[in-house]
Amino acid sequence: MTAIVVTGLGVAAPTGIGVETHWSAILAGRSAIGPITRFDASGYPTRLAGEVPDFVARDRLPGRLIPQTDHWTHLGLATAQDALDDAKVVTSDLPEYQMAVVTAGSSGGTEFGQREIERLWRDGPQHVGAYQSIAWFYAATTGQISIRHGMRGPCGVICTEQSGGLDILGQARRLLRSGSRLVVAGGTDASLCPYGLVAQIAHGRLTTCGDNARAYLPFDADASGYVPGEGGATLILETAESMRARGVDQHYGTILGYHATFDPRPGSGRPPTLESAAAGALADAGLRPDEIDVVFADAVGDPALDHAEATAITKIFGPYGVPVTAPKTMTGRMYAGGATLDVATALLALRDQVIPPTTGVYSPAPRNRIDLVGAYPRQDRLRHAMVLARGHGGFNAALVIGRQLTAHDDQGEATWRK
């Protein structure tokens, strides 16, 4: 089977811009959750969020693109460029129809859309910009990345909310196995505007706690919902053969297994299917449960949903059978960007042999019976990690990644990124 490797990462998260900046903040347990500053949120029940700091679009993007696109696309374009640079990709050296782009979409360009709706209401239809027709659209980031970098291979967007950050990596693997040489796979989100926040509040899972240290406590006895966040990550995926053809022999890790499921309708009496997604990803990777060294949890922060996830984990790995972590307690829940950032963080954990912490959770709910990594990083021997994600509406996905190419891989050995 063709080995799929991750050769580049780009990160723009509340914990910082850049891979190592983000990783340093995560290992230090520095929460980036604080009062919303992108607009006046004083009249809203949720007033905390994780915002990407110090991101200036005009410093990262061509000036003509900025008024044509939403903040969410700005973050996607910036992380895509960083990931390509990290992977040492020279796009002009690769066939344009063998480079693909797939991104995760959730809320779309809500900030751009709100601005144009306000102009429509205040000034009339003649004042609505032509780019309103595309800037809000879920595929806008995919399109802008493909145009900017001359990538004319298969391009698409997957709209499964939080689980989309894993679904795009499953799709990227399919594209590579069917002839693409390189795939840019990214997930970002940026819905911190009045319109976007109201839409999030509507489903009732955002916390109303005003204490940033106690607001987002997944698996804790005092869990009361989650804090929203913005940002995400972009990954460069290639086959091992394509990587070496470019003269590169370093990578962050391998994509070993993926599986997705959809929950039955509410009231059906049938159980949720996250366990099936995790079991399917294990089977796809050809691994036993005891070969997974850490699970990066979806970690909604809702007591019932947390218990459902913990139950799925314990059914596969046994009670307290595998370390579980949720570093998103430091960034907030980032929808389309969250799971992709979790994968980037998991790859860094494999690289440095350390499990990042879950901050703020000091009273784990006893009924969950999971080995939750607490306030401090945990050194461990890490070979494989599983990342779990659930999207609002019933989507589930699980991804298994490995530290490096295995000795039995027919492409041979390669070293991981340092």
Image (cartoon, rainbow, N blue to C red):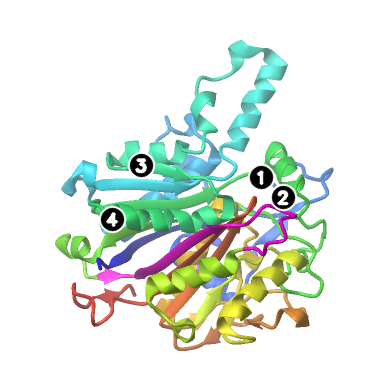
- Give the residue type at disc 2: Ile
Give me the residue at 70% from left, 47% from top: 37
> Magenta residues?
250-272
Q: Which residue is mark 3?
A: 155
317 lies left or right of 81? right
Could you tell me if the residues under marks 1 and 2 are in contact, i.e. CB atoms within 8 Å? Answer: yes
Where's residue 298, x and y in %?
A: 61, 65
- Secondary structure beneath label 2: loop
Give me the residue at 23% from left, 81% from top: 408
Q: Which mark is residue 18?
A: none
- Secondary structure beneath label 1: loop
Between disc 1 and disc 2, the foreground one is 1
- CA–CA distance in space, label 3 to label 1: 27 Å
- Give the residue type at disc 3: Cys
- CA–CA distance in space, label 1 to label 4: 34 Å
Q: Residues within 10 Å of mark 2 (few under 14, many from 20)?
A: some
Position of residue 73 relative to residue 241, above or below, is: above
Position of residue 329 relative to residue 149, above or below, is: below
Q: Which residue is mark 1?
A: 192
Where's residue 414, x and y in %?
A: 23, 75
Between discs 3 and 1, the one toward the N terminus = 3
Between discs 1 and 4, the one toward the N terminus = 4
Give me the residue at 67% from left, 44% from top: 38
Where's residue 192, x and y in %?
A: 66, 45
Q: Which residue is mark 2?
A: 36
Q: Which residue is mark 4?
A: 176
Between disc 1 and disc 4, the foreground one is 4
Give me the residue at 71% from left, 18% from top: 121
Residue 80 visible in the snapshot: yes
